[in-house]
Image (spheres, rainbow, N blue to C red):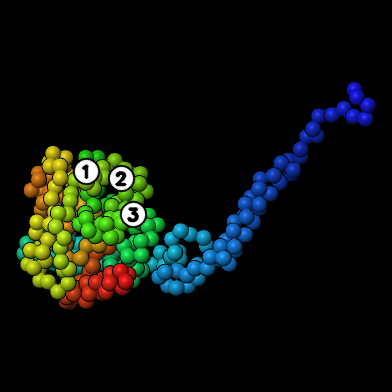
Amino acid sequence: MPPGKAQAGPHPERSPQQRQQGPERSALLVSSLRYTASSLFSVFFPSDCRICSLPLTNISRLPVCPECLDTMARFQGRTCAICGERMFSFSDEAGEQLCGECLAEQPAFRKASAYGSYDAGLRELIHLLKYDRIRTAARVLGRMLAEAVTDLRQEFDIHDAVVIPVPLHSSKLHSRGFNQSELIAEAGLKGAPELRVMKLRPQLLKRVRATESQVGLTREQRQANVRGAFAVTVPDEVRGKNILVVDDVLTTGTTVGECARVLRKAGAAGVWVATVARVMKPEMTAALEPLEAEEALAMSAHAG
């Protein structure tokens, strides 16, 4: 043995208390680092919730506080069995209850399901994605869409279903940079393992004509406005299939109804609709123009 060098002996056995302290110290270190990072983020990158304007206390890629997200609950009122419109009176007769419009003329889709009412925080969250281009909102909206899709699972076999987002016209797609309905659909299917068997095929439906604003139009004018605006690109992949059309918001159902009509004409076995939100008519009135005007003002403001 070289002089001045002591022989290395075996490492002493660690006591159970010392072995337990190791993970505790690691957890304490991780917690300390997270707190430091959060503090630095708050100091150097101050931000407020884009819905309630209160300061955000946690690091998040989505500038919305958990409290605002918690308020975006599912709609619990009675709705039409086909289009999902709010209904204020039900008959005592057994069977499905339909709204006046669906009784007068049933839409081309078999049933529409929405997560919530298009108001308050949910409307603002959709605006963050569509107009402020905060794409991280798509993941939360996708989870909501998945719940709406789950309501339709008894309607058709999801293993053979094709999911088609409502397409944007090329001019709007170019200016916005993305189709919000496609982002939401992709996030919804990815986040719900039981829905991943459904095939997302956005390229099967194309918007071939730009449409005018629907604000202030009658039902007949709305239908004429979107007539011929969509076309199926590969009929062979639609024929005989169950189709789920998805969108961010259903207002009057005219747009998704035209999509369903075109898909059924191409041979689809059936068409269903799922959206994150639905514009619900105020009690005892069918007036929708104020809400649509608000939407138009929001688009104008964000575009500027």
Quadrant containing the N terminus is top right
Along the viewing direction, whichever of 163 and 224 lies nearer the viewer = 224
Indicate the position of residue 106 as horizontal and vertical percent values: 9, 59
Q: Nearer the viewer, mark 2 or mark 3?
A: 3
Is residue 103 in view from this perspective?
no
Mark 3: secondary structure? helix
Along the viewing direction, whichever of 212 and 253 lies nearer the viewer = 212
Going by the numbered disc 1, the residue's amino acid type is Ala
Residue for point 74% across, 43% down: 18
Mark-to-mark CA distance, 2 and 3: 12 Å
Residue for point 30% across, 55% down: 178
Indicate the position of residue 122 as horizontal and vertical percent values: 33, 66
Along the viewing direction, whichever of 269 and 5 lies nearer the viewer = 5
Q: Earlier in the sequence, mark 2 or mark 3?
A: 3
Indicate the position of residue 49 as horizontal and vertical percent values: 45, 69
Task: Kindly identify which numbered label has been placed on residue 142.
Answer: 3
